[in-house]
Each structure stands twice: as structure tokens, then as C-alpha cells.
Image: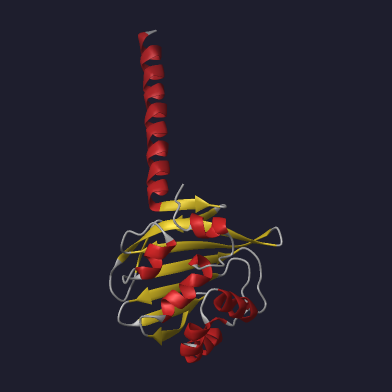
Amino acid sequence: MMRFKQHRLSKATCHIRLLYLLVFLFHSTTLMALIFDNQEIPKTVVLEDTGDVLTLRGAALHKIFFTDGYIGAFYSLDVVSTPAQALADAGPKRMWFFFLRSFDSPKKYWEQAIKNNNSPEVLERDQINISQFFKMVDYPLNQGDILILDYIPNVGTRVIVKGTVRGIIKGNEFYSLILKVWMGRQPPSEKFRKDLFNLS
């Protein structure tokens, strides 16, 4: 009878240890990544060029005609909590996008969004860089594709489409022009702009 009780106690202990292990693994995953709209988003990323560790500031969902279009996530080295701070920040930054539907011609979206969020003077000043950027991003994007826009201080804006570096636009000012597409006066939505700084 005593042996039977000892066996049950040992079994219960194993169950408790297994439960602790599962809870630990869950919390470890939670600390490492954010689950957003069923997509796992890393809470930190490393810029290979500089070794800087960028921290996730928030993630947002853009809906197009009531259907999910893409997830956007914003990373920075310096602590920023508002669009104004992010645009003024001179440190390395990243905008990360996961597409939830196909976009056959992204260029049309970019053209209008850039125009809506920048002054005519800025658009004229950066006309060559904008044209260069359009060539880098004008690829059909399918569900599951990832687009990354990095800002590397004293280097410029790096464009990565589907895991391939499409090019770098030199200079320190162009990234803010692009960042205003999601943080400027006409973002995809007010909620989208707010959620880029909201991890809850």
C-alpha cells in the first residue's frame, strides 16, 4: 500500500514539473516574440552591419476594404514612444512588414502615400531618391512575403524585399520621408500609427 502511494506521489511530481516546464517555455517565447494576428514578431532584431540590437516598439494591422492587408512593426535602438520622437530620432531604426494578402503593383500605393505625407518641397528635393526607391520596391508581393526598411546612420535607407537586399539609398534624410507613410499626417489609420508604439 505504501509503495502505491509513493508511485502516485512520484507521478504527481512529474506532472507538476512538466507544468512548470511548459509555463517556462511559454514565458520564454513570450519574452522573445510578440504574437500579433497569429504572426510571431521578434521583440528584438540585430542590424548585421553595425551589431546594434533594435527593440520592438509596437505592431499594427492595416486593413484594406475590411480585409487584412499587412502587419507593420517598428523597431528602434533609442527609446521612442511617439511618432514625433521616432521621426526625430537619429539612431538606427527598422520598419518590418508581413503581408497578409497579395499586392500586384505596390508602386501605386507608395506614390500616393508618400505624396500625402510629405510637403511639395521635400518631394521635389528627394525626387531622384523617390524614383530609386520605387524601383527597389516595385515587386509583386504575395501572402507571407516580408518587406524590411532599415535606417543605418551615416549609410542610409536599406530596402530588403523577400529576403533580398534591393539596394541602399544614401543619406540621413530619406528614411524620415518614408517613415511618414505610417507616422505622418495621413497614416493608414490613426489606430495603425498609434499601435506602432503599443506593445499591449
**The residue positioned farthest toward the top in the image shown:** 1
> x and y percent of residue 101 in the render?
65, 66
Near-viewer residue (116 or 91): 116
Residue at image coords 36%, 85%: 171
**The residue positioned farthest toward the bottom in the image shown:** 128
Residue at image coords 47%, 83%: 122
**The residue positioned farthest toward the left in the image shown:** 51
Can see residue 154?
yes
Q: How many marks?
A: 0
Q: Reply above or below: 178 against 41.
A: below
> x and y percent of residue 32 in the render?
38, 52
Quadrant placement of the N terminus = top left
Residue at image coords 39%, 12%: 5
Q: Reply above or below: 124 against 114.
A: below
> x and y percent of residue 163 in the render?
48, 75
Residue 188 position by quadrant:
bottom right
| Snapshot colouring | secondary structure
Residue at image coords 41%, 80%: 157
Can see residue 148?
no
> x and y percent of residue 90 in the render?
32, 72
Near-viewer residue (72 or 7): 72
